[in-house]
Image (spheres, rainbow, N blue to C red):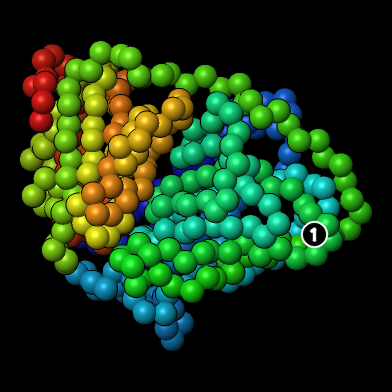
Amino acid sequence: AYWYHSHLHGQSNQQVFGGMAGPMIIRGGLDVQKGYRDIGTRVLVINQTTLGDGVTVRPEPQGPFIPLGAKIFVNGQLNPQIDIAPGELQRWRIFNISAGVFVKLRLQGQPFRVLANDGNNLVRRTKESPLLISPSSRREVLVQGGPAGSYELIAQPFAQFGPTSALPPATLATLNSSGKRVDDPMPPGRLNFRQPDLRGRKINSWHSIKYTQGPPNFFINGQQFSGEQNVAQRMKLGRVAKWKITNSTPFWHTFHIHINDFQIIQQNGHPVNNKNFDDNVAVSPNGGSVTMLYKPREFTGRFVFHCHILGHEDNGMMAVVQVQKGDVPPRQ
């Protein structure tokens, strides 16, 4: 599960908030794996916008990044109805393609059985409830029809812009279980996907990233994005780099880096013991941190890393990284 969107610096938030984005699926993996390949799939695309007089209300370039009256849509609808039979298994691909809203999802009556994060299949299926999906992230989950009745998919309150910013819970969709019961077998929890484990590999370079802000301005290591020619970090092709991202602000942010995915090894100072890979991760406020390992695999050249709350990116929270052959300074 991937997605595409406008990336014009300074206007990314306005354009994605207005709808210039969409989902993209690369088939394979679970689509052909025994036990999963015959499970029906659904695509749930979550975005947020504000409508007024039949048109999208444009965010201001320097805020508010989310205009008043914004609502969260699923596949372009408010509270769409999703049909399922009692006992039926469905595999949902959930995309958060919003310009900047975290969704903390709960499905009445059951946890989510998580299969994949950010296009990467897990080694083993996990259970999560609630399920936090930050802007730009994607999750693939199993859902099973319960006894006949209706079950709400709820966005729980989440205070991403400070303790008083949480909105009331909202019903994003309704799962309607009806008809004759079926007995779909639960597939194996082990998904038989091998991921490279970068832990224990030699570290070639170290990267320390600090998020700060003075709205409407947002900073990485005290600097705002100033053009693709200004390289902030360098890595060596084929070698492992260790990054630590620290969020010293009172807002939630995310960290997203292009081209290759990363393996998280610590979150808020606590070890993360798995081989899962992601391309986007939430970074909690007031000193929250994420430590990750990243290995550039094929391409040299320049690309960006940034917060995927696009109003923050547009106002400075983006920087350039360069992958090159040859020696790289060991600490940056």
Asked which quadrant contains residue 32, the reply is top right
Asked which quadrant contains residue 252, the reply is bottom left
167 shown above or below 182? below
Q: Residue at x 75, y 65 (%)?
A: 150
In this rendering, would 332 be left or right of 115?
Answer: left
- The percent position of residue 276, horizontal first and vertical second, equals 46, 30
- Residue furthest to the right in view is 180
Mark 1 lies on a secondary structure that is strand
- The percent position of residue 139, horizontal first and vertical second, equals 52, 44
Q: Amino acid at mark 1?
A: Ser
- The percent position of residue 200, horizontal first and vertical second, equals 33, 14
The residue carrying mark 1 is 177
Using the image as rendered, state which of residue 133 and residue 230 is in the foreground. 133
In this rendering, would 43 be left or right of 23?
Answer: right
Q: Residues within 10 Å of mark 1 (few under 14, many from 20)?
A: many
Q: Residue at x 89, y 50 (%)?
A: 181
Q: Residue at x 41, y 36 (%)?
A: 278
In this rendering, would 212 be left or right of 6?
Answer: left
